[in-house]
């Protein structure tokens, strides 16, 4: 976590924007839900704006995904965008969330859709931290 905010601060003096470090937490016991989470991580890893991390201490953002099997081949999901506490103690800060359902044949687009729905919120936070670091 501290690494992201330090990178954001340093980027305030450079023209290149830092990659947002995102950890994906999930409770997905069904195959479709696991595929959604897998594809979400792949979308983050393949993004020029973000990078996937697996250690909570390295995360500037957390996407928490919960899925439930709806029927054969479909799952409902809830995804929330969180910011970990700056001091590493206490609870995560809630930014926003989305809910939806996904079929087994479109889990890649569901993972991409979750990330896309959070892109503006992530960019706004990174921008605000970079502005604050300039002062």
Image: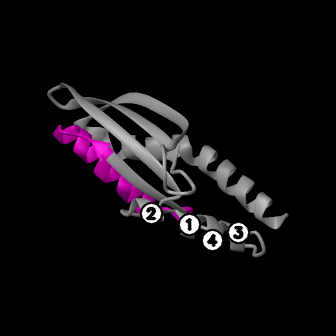
Q: First in sequence, mark 3 or 2: give its number.
A: 3
Q: Which residue is mark 4?
A: 7
SS class, disc 3 = helix
- For disc 1, the marked residue is 2
Q: Nearer the viewer, mark 4 or mark 1?
A: 1
Residue 115 in the image: state x and y as whole percent.
48, 47
How far is the residue under mark 1 from the one under mark 2?
7 Å
Q: Which residue is mark 3?
A: 9
Labels 3 and 4 touching (C-beta < 8 A): yes
| Front position among marks 3 and 1 | 1
**Gap between marks 4 and 1 measured at Cα:** 9 Å
State the residue position of label 2: 57
Task: Using a 10 Å C-alpha cutoff, classify the residue at mark 2 as few (fewer than 14 neighbours), some (14 to 19) or many (20 or more).
Answer: some
- Please state, as top left, top right, bottom left or bottom right, where the C terminus lies in the image: bottom right
Label 1 vs 2, first from the N-terminus? 1
Q: Secondary structure at mark 2?
A: helix
Q: Which one is earlier in the sequence, the residue at label 3 or at label 1?
A: 1
> What residue is at 63 percent from the left and 71 percent from the top?
7
Q: Is residue 38 left or right of residue 4?
A: left
Instruction: Determine which quarter of the picture holds residue 73.
Output: top left
């Amino acid at each position: 976590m501290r690494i992201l905010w330090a990178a954001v601060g340093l980027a305030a003096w450079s023209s290149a924007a830092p990659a947002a470090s995102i950890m994906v937490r999930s409770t997905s016991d069904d195959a479709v839900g696991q595929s959604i989470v897998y594809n979400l991580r792949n979308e983050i890893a393949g993004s020029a704006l973000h990078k996937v991390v697996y250690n909570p201490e390295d995360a500037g953002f957390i996407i928490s995904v919960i899925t439930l099997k709806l029927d054969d081949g479909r799952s409902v999901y809830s995804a929330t965008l969180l910011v970990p506490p700056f001091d590493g103690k206490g609870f995560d800060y809630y930014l926003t969330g989305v809910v939806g359902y996904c079929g087994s044949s479109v889990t890649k687009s569901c993972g991409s859709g979750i990330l896309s729905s959070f892109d503006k919120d992530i960019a706004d936070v990174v921008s605000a931290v970079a502005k604050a670091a300039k002062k």
